Image (cartoon, coloured by chain):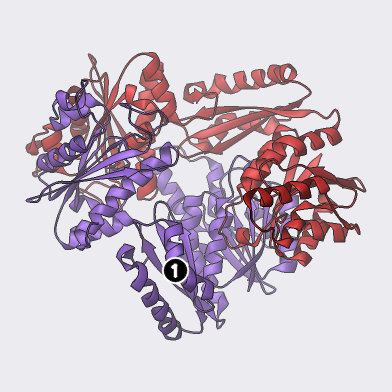
Chain colours: A purple, B red
């Protein structure tokens, strides 16, 4: 099956928005074993959207649109496709009810244009939007399949992974499908991981082995095409074992979850709890953990002690430790240890972690950008301190710092040896 | 002048690379006053590249290619265009000399395929590559202009900003260029903003008014074409005043910055400080503020009291306030007020804010998903509490909650009246 992705939105043509939707969908379609030959971007203009549809029909069996499903007069995708196919526009009552409910629950007047978000092309399947208001559409005519997804990436992803993928699988029928496993690694960079596996990757024919970097982690996807799961599994399993024998100690999950979710699961399984004291990451570490639903059972919370005064007040760290010519300073091994211990005591949790360092852009206390100390305190055990020299801009250093101590914590919880 | 951008590269169609080149070029062309009507992505395949060229010729005067200028057999852009135009391929000697020099200076044998990087389509202008090896090309035939740029963004940007822009300007002559202003709004949704301005937007001819949603904020871009800045400014100013007269109280910046940066600037200007106590947002509010370099002068830090025990221990909130049949509970107006007051006192800051609510997916304390209370404590003033009923999934509710209280804080700081 051949697909074409049409992203609709003048903001893309003005360069105000990066077309990450096309990237995400291309990846997702590749995983389904569907080839993408073209991606097109077209503005909020009915005539040009129609032109893009006419062309895509000649070269693709599956046309996926993103964008143009919103409430405004600029949102034209459904109208343009309905017009092209000589179909009318109908109202999808469940979506309309949801929209009306939302406005009334907020006590705001519903602007009439919001009805457009409940529009369905006549005879199409609704694709429910669990992250927003605009309902998606899916339909087939003359052997061409059309899928309409919203433009905001958060909504698009949820709809694609749920109802859209299910619909696409149903139209694919008996084609050989791509089966994949995803292995997630932490504490190792993409290039080191690739180096450790380079001969396997180079010799790969089937299954294929593809490493790629995620946000702070590295994933390896092993894939094979097969008619059914059992046939794929035997091939995938053999490849997975080869990979594990080399880099297994960095493998934290066999599904696509972030490292913090693996940490929460290990805490839950062992009935232990965690608290955090952050300086340079300013809440990012806590924020990553609390993204996981239900994490309040394992993550008690913590402090963001962005200034020395706050380290003193909230964690009772003596000012003499933090300031003065002979003081170790805020960015030091001993401060990291104290922060982890104090927050663990305050929270009465099993683990306490701390992060203190220099995120940049300027150095601090005469210490260089990228230098970070981490504390890991555990009830009844001696506190450990780790050091890292991280590179990248401010945002990347903050993320890498949060992921670094998350990895140490994962090691401590999974019983892996700490090097 | 109308342009089309053709990005060449199978890695884009597999979703391995994000097409940031198209975004960058679209911005650059918009600044030159050139309209981009389509962006196309095509793989490393001669027949499909040719098909993309044939189509683009029918709808653009200027076709800009990125990618496919490298040394490998997969790099086909020059060959495909030369073939389409019935032109031969020539060697650009200065580029060839540069390539040979590089290899000999490094003492490495030059692989023969590197000659391809010095190829020029017969009769085209070379565009020198100051950041890499592959020479760019520019040519005009039958009224259509073609510009070939390399794929790696670092090389593409340098070539576009230098020789390519100069060449494009030379073919444009005295055309008018686009001038824009960006206005940033908070505390109002995209559809309400549009409704307030709908007659202006509908009547827009020049300047144009385009609202679009960013992460938690809404932007309006007003644009006009003019020969020079002064001419543009008078028109842009008049439109800006019209917009301000209607929705000015939501306008927090006249440049593209997030709301938290506007808050940090106002705190800095008035020499005031802030601390936060977060429950449902789990560190997100602090994380947004600490993304801004230098924010430690204004943001002292705060606490993430994800559990009731932590609210009690870190903020000294009585357990009788939080738990028990008659207790207000963690998600309540009075807890929000206490959290904001206590964190302000602990940090000895001018402002203390708090966020407590239900992020979902499940309800909490019998309170519905999306219900959030915010506290805003200010030194020497009575504490205020705000309530919101937010919709969306867990991630969206958390983000909207953080932005909601950020907006209240911005109002308090900018002296805007609180409704």
Nearer the observer, A89 or A287:
A287
In the image: residue B181, left or right of residue B340: right
Residue B223, by quadrant, is: top right
Position in image of residue A381 (x %, y %): 9, 51
The x and y percentages for residue A296 are 21, 50
Residues packed near mark 1 inside 10 Å, few (<14), some (14 to 19) or many (20 plus):
some
On-image quarter of the C terminus of chain B: top left
Q: Chain of mark 1?
A: A
| Residue A138 sits in quarter | bottom right
Pick the residue in front: A168 or B12: B12
Task: Pinpoint residue A395: horizontal percent, then vertical percent.
Answer: 42, 39
Res. B284 visible in picture: no
Q: Position of residue B337 (x, y in %)?
A: 21, 28
At horizontal 74% and vertical 33% (from top left) the residue drawn is B32
- Image height of A234 relative to A33, above or below: below
Residue on which disc 1 sits: A197
Residue in the image at 11% along x and 37% along y: B312
Give the image quarter of residue B260: top left
- The number of callouts visible is 1
Secondary structure beneath label 1: helix
Q: Check the picture and name the quadrant holding the N terminus of chain B.
A: top right
């Amino acid at each position: 099956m051949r697909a074409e992705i049409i992203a609709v939105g003048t903001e893309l043509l003005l360069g105000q928005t990066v077309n990450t939707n096309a990237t995400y969908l291309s990846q997702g379609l590749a995983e389904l074993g569907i080839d993408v030959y073209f991606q097109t971007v077209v503005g909020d203009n009915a005539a040009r959207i129609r032109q893009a549809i006419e062309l895509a029909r000649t070269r693709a069996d599956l046309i996926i649109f993103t964008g143009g499903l919103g409430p405004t007069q600029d949102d034209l995708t459904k109208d343009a496709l309905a017009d092209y196919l000589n179909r009318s526009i109908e109202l999808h009552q469940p979506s309309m009810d949801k929209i009306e409910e939302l406005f009334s629950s907020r006590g705001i007047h519903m602007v009439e244009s919001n009805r457009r978000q409940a529009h369905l092309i006549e005879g199409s399947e609704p694709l429910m939007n669990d992250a927003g208001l605009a309902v998606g559409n899916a339909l087939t005519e003359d052997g061409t399949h059309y899928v309409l997804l919203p433009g905001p990436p958060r909504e698009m992803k949820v709809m694609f992974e749920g109802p859209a993928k299910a619909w696409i699988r149903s139209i694919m029928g008996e084609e050989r499908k791509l089966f994949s496993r995803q292995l997630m690694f932490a504490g190792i960079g993409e290039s080191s991981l690739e180096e450790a596996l380079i001969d396997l990757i180079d010799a790969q024919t089937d299954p294929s082995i593809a490493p790629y970097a995620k946000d702070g982690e590295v994933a390896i996807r092993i894939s094979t095409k097969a008619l059914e799961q059992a046939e794929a599994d035997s091939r995938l399993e053999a490849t997975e074992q080869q990979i594990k024998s080399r880099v297994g100690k960095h493998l934290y999950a066999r599904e696509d979850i972030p490292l913090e979710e693996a940490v929460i699961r290990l805490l839950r399984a062992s009935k232990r709890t965690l608290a955090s004291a952050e300086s340079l990451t300013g809440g990012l570490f806590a924020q990553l953990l609390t993204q996981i639903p239900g994490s309040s059972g394992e993550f008690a919370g913590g402090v963001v002690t962005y200034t020395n005064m706050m380290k003193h007040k909230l964690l009772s760290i003596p000012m003499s430790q933090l300031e003065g010519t002979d003081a170790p300073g805020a960015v030091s091994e001993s401060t990291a240890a104290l922060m982890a211990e104090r927050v663990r005591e305050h929270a009465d949790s099993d683990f306490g972690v701390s992060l203190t360092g220099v995120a940049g852009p300027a150095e601090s206390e005469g210490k260089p950008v990228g230098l970070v100390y981490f504390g890991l305190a555990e009830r009844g055990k001696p506190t450990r301190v780790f050091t890292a020299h991280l590179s990248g801009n401010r945002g990347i250093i903050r993320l890498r710092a949060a992921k670094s101590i998350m990895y140490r914590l994962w090691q401590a919880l999974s019983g892996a040896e700490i090097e």
